[in-house]
Image (spheres, rainbow, N blue to C red):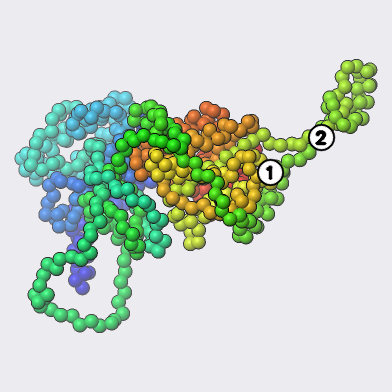
């Protein structure tokens, strides 16, 4: 009974204090393509991706009902940095969907205007608004409608204290006439957030994370996914397991007798972890080695790890692109070549036999065959038809093209498949398979198919642990036949560490350029975006990989990416181009689809 009364009271408070319209909500996922197109068309950085931003604390004045309900404690505001344009996960601030959609597009246009950071938040947003309206007059009418709805949403000035009323009036004047107010009046409380403006760039706080080796994720826990972005910091694991008892046991004046009864408890499995994260101002994370019953995947703004420039020795030293300075920094990465291991040779796994036989039938047309060529200048046999035409038309002239010749038809092609062996491939894609299992089966069937067509191919894998240790694994070299020894190496692959993709592609480019065939294909097989535990994260890794792909194309290679990451549309078009990648919607189908995809690419 008490629980039901509490729930009813909470719902009443929410209705009284809510300034939102859930029925008119527009989600970012439904409009992100339009937002990204408008942002880049108006001059926004093409390398910036569209992400859901984190909520920030709202320190403006709240009435007693808002404080009791917890509403208006956190707010979604937009902002842009070198990595991403971060927008609210959903907008329901206005009573119609058209207004909420227009707000997304307006924020994208405002974010595309570069403004000096020396200006204050108040003047910078006014200046950017003026630039948008002057350059793109078609957005002026939408802006006026949004201003009217925003001012109506902000409530009555008469209910505010005098200093807060002056501050609020200045904001409204700045919204109506951008550039007319040069300074925001001071008040005891900050103003209510302005949904039409960008907030200052957020910078993560706290110490960088400890350098602790990663471990595979637990498979016993229930996983949830959350698309919001949240602020976080690193912290140390408390050593003390117990807590201090803050009351005296004898002060408890009631006692309950335990009775075993039927009781049905219902929990919202989809929202309870996300709601707990929303209630935290700052998420503190650390690392332990205990399994948990539930886990939630989310994006966190964490401080970067230490990126001290120490000298690199041994291995192959390669450069790396720094998008912030627009320079290719020399001697930045060390690629350690992992030699071919003497793993136990094996045959093709039994569960792949049926797929192998089906692929053999499909690829029989690509097998090398001998062609009989007529009217050749030399050969072992006489072409009677050509000889008769020669005698009849040329009367014994000098042309002697009346021989038969047989030649073997071969495709002038070399393919290098580079597979991602990072720790993220330990994730499960079904009840029975992990991503690394799918990649292993894909390498098996791909090799079986290409060995049948006798195409020249090689297999390599990579993972990394910061810039000093990019590990390059050899499964099959170009000059090595496909055998049980190669199958044994494929069977023994395991995931570890991170995905420093740029360095791996540069080394792969050097190997593939050594092949003298007419066509050279670089096939990348991965499950996610470039990343590492140092500064190689987000935009940095994406831009470095993009530069490595551009350099590969300049040397005559044909790069193509195959991924099982369902969110790869956010970054792969920028790296590989619109037609340089494919997303496998069902990862378990990758082993059978990869050979077919290869035949289409090389047709």
Q: Residue, x 10% and y 72% (percent of image)?
A: 248
Residue with the mark numbered 1? 453
**Viewed as shown, does residue 311 lie left or right of 10?**
right
Q: Image quadrant for the N terminus?
A: bottom left
In this view of the protein, which residue sits in the foreground, 465 or 98?
Answer: 465
Task: Residue 360 in the image: state x and y as whole percent.
Answer: 69, 50
Residue 276 quadrant = bottom left
Q: Is residue 325 above or below residue 411?
A: above
Which type of secondary structure does the marked residue at label 2 adopt? strand
Question: Residue 341 in the image: x percent, y percent?
Answer: 54, 49
Residue 583 visible within the image: no
Q: Residues within 10 Å of mark 2 (few under 14, many from 20)?
A: some
Residue in the image at 30% along x and 42% along y = 305
Against 178, is 447 above or below?
Answer: below
Q: Which one is earlier in the sequence, the residue at label 2 or at label 1?
A: 2
Q: Is residue 337 visible?
A: yes
Q: Position of residue 344 (x, y in %)?
A: 58, 55
Left or right placement of residue 599 versus residue 400 in this view: left
**Residue sitting at x 49%, y 53%:** 494
Name the residue nearer the viewer: 509 or 445.
509
Q: Which mark is residue 505?
A: none
**According to the image, label 2 marks what residue?**
406
As measured in the structure, the alpha-carbon distance from the residue carrying label 2 to the one carrying label 1 is 19 Å
Quarter of the image for residue 409 reads: top right
Total marks shown come to: 2
Lateral position of residue 174 relative to residue 439, left or right: left
Q: Residue at x 31, y 66 (%)?
A: 267
Q: Which of the 4 image quarters holds residue 414?
A: top right
Asked whether the beta carbons under mark 2 and mark 1 sit within 8 Å of each other, the answer is: no
Question: 77 or 233: nearer the eye?
Answer: 233
């Amino acid at each position: 009974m008490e629980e039901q009364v509490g729930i009813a009271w909470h719902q009443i408070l929410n209705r009284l204090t809510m300034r939102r319209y859930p029925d008119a909500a527009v989600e970012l996922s439904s409009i992100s393509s339009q937002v990204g197109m408008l942002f880049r068309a108006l001059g926004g950085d093409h390398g910036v991706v569209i992400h859901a931003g984190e909520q920030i604390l709202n320190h403006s004045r709240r009435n007693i009902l808002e404080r009791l309900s917890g509403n208006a404690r956190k707010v979604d505001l937009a902002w842009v940095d070198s990595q991403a344009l971060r927008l609210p996960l959903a907008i329901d601030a206005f009573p119609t969907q058209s207004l909420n959609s227009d707000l997304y597009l307006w924020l994208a246009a405002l974010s595309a205007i570069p403004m000096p950071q020396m200006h204050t938040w108040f003047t910078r947003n006014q200046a950017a608004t003026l630039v948008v309206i002057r350059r793109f007059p078609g957005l002026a009418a939408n802006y006026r409608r949004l201003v009217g709805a925003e001012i109506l949403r902000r409530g009555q000035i008469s209910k505010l204290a005098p200093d807060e009323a002056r501050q609020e009036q200045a904001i409204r004047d700045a919204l109506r006439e951008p550039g007319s107010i040069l300074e925001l009046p001071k008040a005891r409380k900050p103003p209510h957030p302005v949904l039409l403006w960008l907030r200052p760039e957020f910078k993560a706080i706290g110490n960088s994370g400890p350098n602790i080796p990663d471990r595979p994720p637990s498979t016993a826990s229930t996983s949830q996914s959350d698309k919001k972005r949240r602020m976080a910091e690193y912290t140390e694991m408390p050593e003390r397991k117990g807590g201090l008892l803050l009351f005296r046991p004898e002060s408890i004046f009631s006692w309950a007798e335990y009775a075993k009864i039927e009781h049905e408890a219902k929990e919202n499995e989809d929202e309870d972890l996300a709601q707990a994260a929303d209630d935290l101002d700052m998420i503190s994370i650390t690392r332990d080695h205990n399994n948990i019953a539930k886990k939630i995947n989310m994006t966190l703004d964490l401080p970067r790890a230490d990126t001290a420039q120490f000298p690199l020795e041994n291995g192959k030293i390669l450069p790396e692109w720094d998008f912030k300075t627009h320079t290719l920094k020399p001697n930045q990465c060390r690629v350690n070549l992992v030699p071919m291991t003497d793993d136990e040779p094996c045959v093709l796994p039994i569960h792949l036999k049926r797929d192998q036989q089906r692929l053999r039938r499909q690829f029989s047309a690509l097998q090398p065959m001998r062609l009989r060529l007529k009217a050749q200048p030399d050969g072992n046999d006489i072409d009677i038809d050509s000889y008769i035409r020669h005698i009849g038309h040329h009367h014994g002239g000098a042309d002697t093209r009346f021989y038969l010749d047989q030649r073997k038809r071969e495709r002038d092609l070399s393919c290098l498949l580079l597979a991602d062996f990072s720790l993220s491939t330990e994730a499960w894609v079904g009840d029975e398979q992990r991503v690394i299992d799918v990649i292993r089966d894909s390498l098996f069937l791909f090799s079986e198919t290409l060995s049948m067509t006798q195409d020249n191919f090689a297999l390599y894998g990579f993972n990394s642990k910061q810039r000093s240790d990019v590990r390059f694994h050899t499964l099959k070299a170009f000059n090595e036949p496909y055998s049980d020894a190669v199958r044994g190496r494929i069977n023994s692959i395991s995931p570890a560490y991170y995905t420093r993709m740029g360095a791996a592609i540069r080394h792969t480019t050097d190997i593939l350029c050594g092949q003298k065939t007419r066509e050279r294909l670089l096939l990348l097989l991965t499950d996610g975006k470039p990343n590492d535990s140092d500064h190689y994260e987000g935009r940095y890794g994406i831009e470095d990989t993009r530069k490595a792909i551009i350099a590969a194309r300049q040397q005559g290679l044909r790069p193509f990416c195959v991924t099982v990451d369902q969110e790869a549309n956010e970054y792969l078009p920028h790296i590989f181009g619109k037609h340089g990648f494919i997303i496998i919607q069902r990862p378990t189908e990758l082993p059978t689809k990869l050979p077919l995809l290869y035949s289409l690419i090389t047709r």
